[in-house]
Image: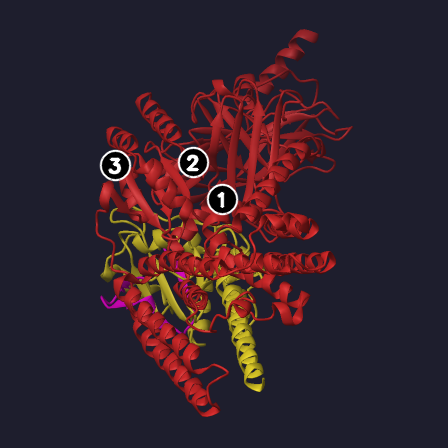
Amino acid sequence: MALPRTLITSFAALVLMAGHSAAQTYEGRELVRAELVADTSAVTPGKPFTVGLLLHMVPGWHTYWRFPGDAGIPTEIKWNLPAGWKAGEIQWPIPLKLDEPGDIQIYGYHDEVLLMQEMTPPASLNGSAVQLTADASWLVCEKICIPGSATVRMDLPVGSGAAANQQIFARFRKLLPQPWPSKGMTAKWTRAGPGARLVIEGDGLAKNGFVDFYPAPPPKVVVSHPVVENRDDKRITFRIPFDSADKNLASLNGVFVFGSSPDSPDRSGWAVPVSAPNAASSAAPTAQQGLITLFFFGFLGGLILNLMPCVLPVISLKIFGFVRQAGQTRSKILRSGLAFAAGIFAWFIALGLLLVGLKSAGHQITWAFQFTDPYFVFGMAVLVLVFALNMFGVFEVSLPQRATRGMLGLTDREGEAGSFVQGVFATLLATPCTAPYLGTALGFAFTQSGIVIMAMFMSIAAGMAFPYVLLAAQPAWLRFLPKPGPWMNHVRQVMGFLLLATLLFLLYVVGAQRGLEGLIWASAFLLVVSVACWIKGIFLVPTASLRSRSIAVIVILVMLLGGGAYFIGQKFRTSTASQLANSEPGGWQPFSPSLLQAELQQGHPVFVDFTAAWCLNCKFNEARVLENAVVRDAFQQHGVTKLKADWTSGDPVITKILQQFGRVGVPFYVLYPGNSAEPVVFPELLTKDLVLERLEGVSRRVASQ
Amino acid sequence: MKAYRAEWLLNNMITKTILTAVSSLVAVTLFAADSPPVGSNAPQFSLPDAKGKTQALADFKGKYVVLEWFNPQCPFVKKHYGSGNMQKLQQDFTGKGVVWLTIDSSAPGAEGNLTAEQAGAVVNSWKTHQTALLLDPEGKVGRAYGAKNTPHMFVINPEGKVVYEGAIDSKATPNPADIANSTNYVKVALDESMSGKPVSNPNTRPYGCSVKYQ
């Protein structure tokens, strides 16, 4: 009896294990056929098995993954199960990443997909067969999108089943993301800008022709396109830009996908752990090390700030203070040095708290952003000019004794308070210098937690204050400084020229933002300011009569207000930089998203230089590397289109693109290989070799396709 | 001595003024930047509408402006028009002085591309209530805004800043029956913004068909 029974069961299974299929038709054409399949021929009570919704799409059409990408919606399955049955989560095979015009990326399936779920029947089953029913709905798209839905059913006999539909289950099980390997491979998440950075490290990563991260974010998180920031044999860095209400969110569910090519059937994937405790503890030391290096550079940066042309003049006054104090008591010198240092710290603490406050209030903070505002740059220019005129002795006539008190005139009279204010003032003047110079380091710090931001500012403050604390603590070293004398006046004037050099730089930025016209009107106002300072120097002096002093004050006010209203309020406000000529020297073209798109569509590789007139690092990279003859030839040889994205005035379109790459400022360099491969991001400090190497890499990849 | 004191006072005053001016300058310009696209200046554009008239965003400065990406053949767009949901929203807010610009960025030959005449027919037969239906067949404006879906919604405040970007509502399905149980993010953003509050949910994941660019 046993044999026929098996036969009957098998026959029944053949008929029944594939359910009834349902089709979605559109204008007489079948787009999608849906059916249920099971990996067993019969249901054994209490024993889990797998059921899959099998969707056949007509060629060219696709349905969507659990995270559809920029458009579309995932397929949904709602089960109507008999009492006691349980269905597991949908197991999604690794999808294909599909590109559509307009920089639209979606994740979906072509041809055929099996969405599997584990089914657990109750421990006892009545009857000889069960029917499982589900309402499935999907969106299928080609050039157009059509929603589809079907009620799919399958009947399975109750009994001891044999494996069924092995081939199709094997095919799609191979495409399921695997758990993260327990050994030899690490995944580390860090918060970076709006989004996160994922670093995957391990041996054997090199052999994959293709690697990618497919995000599967929770519904409230808005994710843009992940990019490979860096890749070498053992390490891949992904940048995943996203926006979420939780500003501390630093990781996403998702799949690390790899294989010979994005659409090969041998593609595999691992589910990326979301900040697992293990990964976190092993990541901590390296992160800490990175931070310590960063703080060290902050300190060094602070130290060097003292020599910046906008700070040195203030600092020189402090040095004069020390020179004169050489004969004074040790404790007095120490107090004055510490007060100066406290002033430096006070400014940085205030700035740091303000930034952290704004950041926690959800603002996107950037450093150097102030430089995109022409009025800020111009304000700094006025301040620097006034200070320079003071240094030249145009006003506040310089008796040697008074000169040493500096611009604030407070030093002596109020002792430590004076030193403190000087410290604040020195740091205040340092602000325009920090932007071009420390922008990159601060830009990184801003993506970190509040504590890191504060610590970064503290290390800069410590670096800046270091020499004074040292001199104050060891007044004996003051004897290395020369004795007070007329030389101090000369140094002061030299400092004035340094300030004029700073002014030149600021005016260059103003010119870049507001054109030649704007530059001239701004300079006209600077002339007015100079004359006002001169009047102050001549007539607003203690020896002048009260009457002439009153007249002087009125004249100064009229000049400043009138000049300000006319030159700045009217002329400067309305002037704009002339449109960039269509081709800049050296074969650069002004950046626009549509131009980028057009060039890429023609298959040209594109290099984009994100730069600004006020960004010294950018200028350095351009002069040393990008305009280097060898590099220029290499660009030409590889047929790379060079675009220059000028962020001098904070163009919002460019800001948006910077943010897609998780950047808060310039410099930034990216190379689009032109074969729809991932863009290659360069480090902030370019080297000739690096650029040449990446250019070679692009041609190789293009050639191999 | 008195004169000397006066000069000292003046010096002191100038110093303090400069300090205050510069600190506020730093505070204002340095940190006023929000995360684009939400918080950034809305890119300027001008496009022809269904009647052939050119409409420029700059013409609506000082008003709230809603941008709605549109494709009359997309099932997600049909969900909101077939149910009358979109028309009602348009009517409610244009009634409150909001400018509502519906933009079709479908390329010629692609799904949803409209000639001016066809656009006029859609407006009539669907009884829509937007301020204007704009035609962007080259996709320039769509790309400038990074519009990826139909519908993809943007709310711009009277200062010209984007205050909302994302989905029309919270239920990402093509099923009109879901409208009743969903939160309309555009309505919430407009209500909040127009009563002077910050938008609680300024950036959501848009859903729908992809915009059919060239």
Q: Position of residue A478 (x, y in %)?
A: 63, 51
Residue A383 shows in the view: yes
Both marks 3 and 2 on one chain: yes
Q: Position of residue A224 (x, y in %)?
A: 48, 44
Farthest-out residue, right? A123
- Crowding around mark 2 (Cα neighbors within 10 Å: few <14, some 14 to 19, many 20+) is some
Query: Disc number at residue A73?
Result: 1
Chain letter tied to yellow: B
Q: Position of residue B213 (x, y in %)?
A: 32, 47
Q: Are marks 1 and 2 in contact (CB under 8 Å)?
A: no
| Quadrant of the snapshot with the C terminus of chain A | top left
Q: Is B120 placed left or right of A549 in the picture?
A: left
Q: Secondary structure at mark 3?
A: loop
Q: Earlier in the sequence, mark 1 or mark 2?
A: 1
Residue at coordinates 39% horizontally, 81% vertically from top-left?
Answer: A561
Q: Are marks 1 and 3 in contact (CB under 8 Å)?
A: no
Quarter of image, res A286: top right
Q: Is residue A225 or residue A614 the one in the foreground?
A: A614
Q: Is residue A73 or residue A28 the one in the foreground?
A: A73
Range shown magenta? B45-71
Q: Is A32 placed left or right of A403 in the picture?
A: left
Up-down: is A420 above or below A218? Answer: below
Chain letter tied to red: A
B47 falls in the magenta region: yes
* Tag 2: amino acid: Phe
Query: Disc number at residue A602?
Result: 3
